[in-house]
Image (spheres, rainbow, N blue to C red):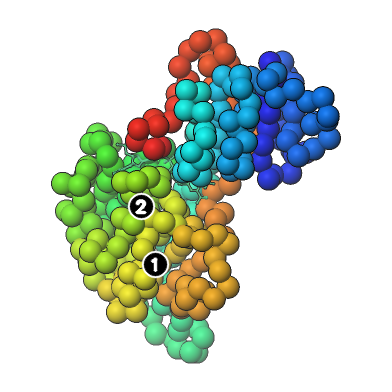
Amino acid sequence: MNIIFISPDDPTPWRKALRKHLPEADVFFWGTDDIGDGFDKASIDYALVWKPDPGLLASFPNLKGIFNLGAGVDALLRDNTLPRHVPLVRLVDPQLSSGMVEYVAHWVLHFHRDMHIYAHQQRAHDWTPHNNASTATRRVGVLGLGELGQSCAHALMMLGFESVSGWSRTMKQLPGVRSFAGQDGLKDFLKQAEILVCLLPLTDATRGLINAESLALLPKGAFIINAGRGPLVVDEDLIAALNSGHVAAAALDVFNTEPLPGNHPYWTMESVHITPHVASLTTPMSSSAVIAEALRDLDAGKTPTNLVDFDQGY
Ligand code: NDP
Ligand code: OXD
């Protein structure tokens, strides 16, 4: 079995991880000395990729499967030449989920416990205590109840949040989580989300979903945590909502343009907390284990879990 690995990541830990979890495969690392003059693209069975250059995957004529080295496939689906007859599998990895849980729990607690206010007060040498809000009454809403959204909703309940809700395309039955679905459920979901966690994939249906209209539905003083994708948010609308105080603060990990341009207003807004798309990072060892399992399923003619639905775009 021959595999092409295409990613800007350092190949060294990946070589080690793939040797351990896929010892039967010959793995060739694109952009390294593995790809000599006689390299035969037709010999490649599977591709492991993160943001390959558009057109590159189409140049491997005999691919039997493509494995995305991340959860979001929006960048891949933007490539019009992507071979759509080839199964595309996205990454679902317990370590990716736990990284996201850490990021989301951090910011939910940060806002819930007024840390954004105390940070501001510290700069003003201001010793004003505030009453602590209660997890019994704080309402947290998770946009996107997939692998990551469900893990985060569960973790928030474990932290004591008694009012956790989620919004997805299809209705969910998750113990303790109030489920809202589809456009019909969106308004009611937003109206009660004091802390809004965004873990939606970027698709034609979700682009720009966080806009003036949806932001206006949030309770006054709401918080936004976006670790899904930047273009889910209309930046000017979020900035206006932050400036008016309707949205109290935002933690943003993903942006319309990455890296975030140096002159972007977010950089200097006190109410905005920026991280450089690190909410959860793919780790070679744990993701190689799950990719190896899915790859063997596919090779044995089974349908792997976590196949991308090209029609839905995720
Ligand atoms: P999943 O595919 O497991 O879940 C996606 C969720 O979004 C599902 O609940 C789905 O609904 C819902 N959804 C999709 N489209 C719509 C829609 N039009 N209306 C309502 N709900 C919708 O994805 P993951 O949880 O694994 O990952 C989510 C995203 O997180 C990734 O696509 C990626 O963009 C981002 N991410 C960011 C990282 C970071 O470091 N910042 C790291 C990893 C991922 P349903 O359940 O009904 O299908
Ligand atoms: C992902 C990401 O989609 O890191 O996995 O953004």
* Badge 2 amino acid: Arg
Secondary structure beneath dot 2 equals loop
Viewed as shown, does residue 50 lie left or right of 109? right
Secondary structure beneath dot 1 equals helix
Quadrant in which the C terminus appears = top left
Res. 240 image quadrant: bottom left
Q: Nearer the viewer, residue 13 or 206?
A: 206
- Marks 1 and 2 sit apart, C-alpha to C-alpha, by 12 Å
Residue at 39% across, 38% down: 313
Q: Are marks 1 and 2 in contact (CB under 8 Å)?
A: no
Kindly identify which residue carries mark 2: 207
Q: Nearer the viewer, residue 115 or 252?
A: 252
* Badge 1 amino acid: Asp
Q: Earlier in the sequence, mark 1 or mark 2?
A: 2
Query: Residue 147 at x, y = what percent?
Result: 41, 37
Residue at 50% across, 83% down: 122
Kindly identify which residue carries mark 1: 235
